[in-house]
Image (cartoon, helix red, strand yellow):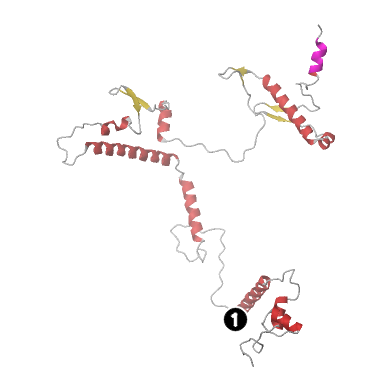
Amino acid sequence: MDVSNILASHASKFKSVTVEKETPLEIDTGLLLVSDPNPIEQDSYKENLEEHLQSLARDGAQALISALFSLPTKQSPDGPLAVLPPPVFQLPRAKPLPKPKPQTKWEKFAAAKGIQHKVRDKKVWDEEKQEWVNRWGRNGKNREVEEQWIHEVPLNADVDYDPRKAARDERKQRIAKNEKKHQQNLARAGAVSRDERKAEIEKTLATTRISTASMGKFDKRLEGEKKIRGVKRKFDPNEGSVEAEKNASLNLLSKMESDKRKMRKEPQADEGVLNVRKAVKIASKGRGGIALGREMSGGKSRGRGGKGGRGGRR
């Protein structure tokens, strides 16, 4: 039975695993990156954008998968894994490389002696209880002395001597001592050089100098302090000519007037040129728009001399 026709018709439904283009795709398996340098086909791009993008994504993914299957593999509990080569494409960094963390005193000693860091187990074996107990924390091995039911009291101990409290205080002192050494190691490892510290102090001093009203001109200088560069100190004399003071005052007044004009409220678009509210108030002599309407229509207003007003009936 010849099934070549059936296989050919079935294969025609799927695209080939070999991606062929005018300009070969640039594949960087180390970064799992595929770049397509070919120009965009304007007709297919404008005709059906979604289908065009899917075709480009399919070709790139197929080329990358084919390149991965050609790499050497290694065995793992999850199955064979491809060994990726070093990356070729240089990716830009958003931030500079972090500076290497300086070693502490213990890390330097361990590196010189070849001591390997080992993680201590959280559980230790208790010979008396014949079980695994916590090394630290609640019911920990480090609290065994202060939590035992019987203690030996020294002969020269005070009357109020508490062995449990003494053991607890000793444990707290060990914790405080270790923490102090840890902080000293961190400070020693992260200590800045003398030049950097000097530059930081000079920068802080310059900032405080120029923060005064006189920009540091009348401040007392320290011995050996350098002159601050880049700071211009220009002050007018206390006594000057009358003409100069007059011009300065006029300039200040003109500036205040111009600022006042800018701050004036502009009429809104719906108000127009005429302020209707103000016009009604003037025409009615403060009585309001209703009284003005009655007067214009020939009716009597309820004023002082009107009927029912404060003047009473005649």
Q: Is residue 217 left or right of residue 26?
A: left
- Give above or below for 270 relative to 21: below
Asked whether the viewer can see residue 130, the reply is yes
245 shown above or below 82: below
In this rendering, would 239 be left or right of 295? left
Left or right of residue 179: residue 55: right
Please tell me which residue lies in front, 244 or 93: 93
Where is residue 252? Give x, y as percent. Answer: 62, 75
Q: Which residue in the structure is indicated by mark 1?
A: 242
Magenta residue check for 187: no
Is residue 245 depicted above or below 174 in this figure? below
Q: Please provide percent x and percent y for residue 214.
A: 51, 66
User: Residue 14: percent from the left, percent from the top?
Assistant: 78, 21
Quarter of the rendering occupied by the N terminus: top right
**x 46%, y 48%: residue:** 197
Q: Position of residue 246 (x, y in %)?
A: 62, 80
Residue at left offset 27%, top offset 39%: 169
Kind of residue at badge 1: Val
Secondary structure found at label 1: helix
Q: Which residues are magenta?
A: 3-10
